[in-house]
């Protein structure tokens, strides 16, 4: 598929076509695939606009109570909050100091 994604034509590329554990998928290709799929999860069909519901669905699908949920781009802390509410431990980090402070404030507000 190398080269074809620069033409914005990913409609015929299946997810299995780039499941290679020895390399990463270029950002542009990831974006084009997400756009092709309507920015929805191919597993559950939800979109980022579903927010907390999407986080809960993924947390409950992939973890059990007591597990640790890691969110490397926690933003405002929605995933961390939903992990705590659903009896999971969480680790969240973000490149933005402002978002880290926002997350701490939100979680403190909810006593989490």
Image (cartoon, rainbow, N blue to C red):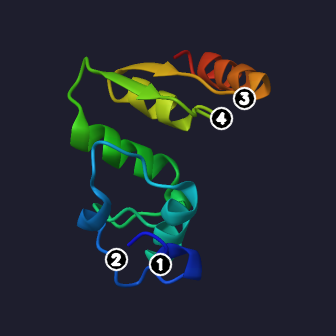
What residue is drawn where x is 33% and y is 45%? 58
Residue where numbered disc 3 is placed? 99
In the shown orientation, is residue 36 left or right of residue 99? left
C-alpha distance separating marks 1 and 3: 36 Å
**In the figure, 68 relative to 25: above or below?**
above
Single out the mark in the foreground, 1 or 4. 1
Q: Residues within 10 Å of mark 3 (few under 14, many from 20)?
A: some
The tag earlier along the polypeptide, 1 or 3, is: 1
The tag earlier along the polypeptide, 4 or 3, is: 4
The tag earlier along the polypeptide, 2 or 3, is: 2
Residue where numbered disc 1 is placed? 4
The tag earlier along the polypeptide, 1 or 4, is: 1
Single out the mark in the foreground, 1 or 3. 1
SS of the residue at dot 2? loop
Residue where numbered disc 4 is placed? 76
Single out the mark in the foreground, 2 or 3. 2
Whether residue 99 is visible here, answered yes or no, is yes
Q: Do the residues labelled 4 and 3 touch (CB within 8 Å)?
A: yes
The tag earlier along the polypeptide, 2 or 1, is: 1
Quarter of the figure with residue 69:
top left
The tag earlier along the polypeptide, 4 or 2, is: 2
Residue where numbered disc 2 is placed? 13
Residue 43 pos. (x, y %): 28, 61
């Amino acid at each position: 598929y190398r080269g074809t994604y620069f033409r914005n034509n990913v409609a015929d590329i299946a997810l299995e076509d780039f499941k290679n554990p020895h390399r990463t998928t270029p950002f542009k290709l990831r974006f084009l695939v997400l756009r092709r799929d309507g920015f929805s999860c191919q597993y559950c069909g939800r979109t980022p606009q579903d927010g907390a519901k999407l986080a809960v669905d993924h947390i409950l699908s992939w973890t059990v109570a007591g597990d640790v949920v890691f969110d490397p781009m926690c933003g405002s802390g929605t995933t961390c909050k939903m992990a705590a509410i659903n009896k999971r431990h969480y680790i969240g980090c973000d490149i933005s100091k402002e978002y880290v402070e926002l997350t701490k404030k939100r979680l403190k507000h909810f006593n989490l």
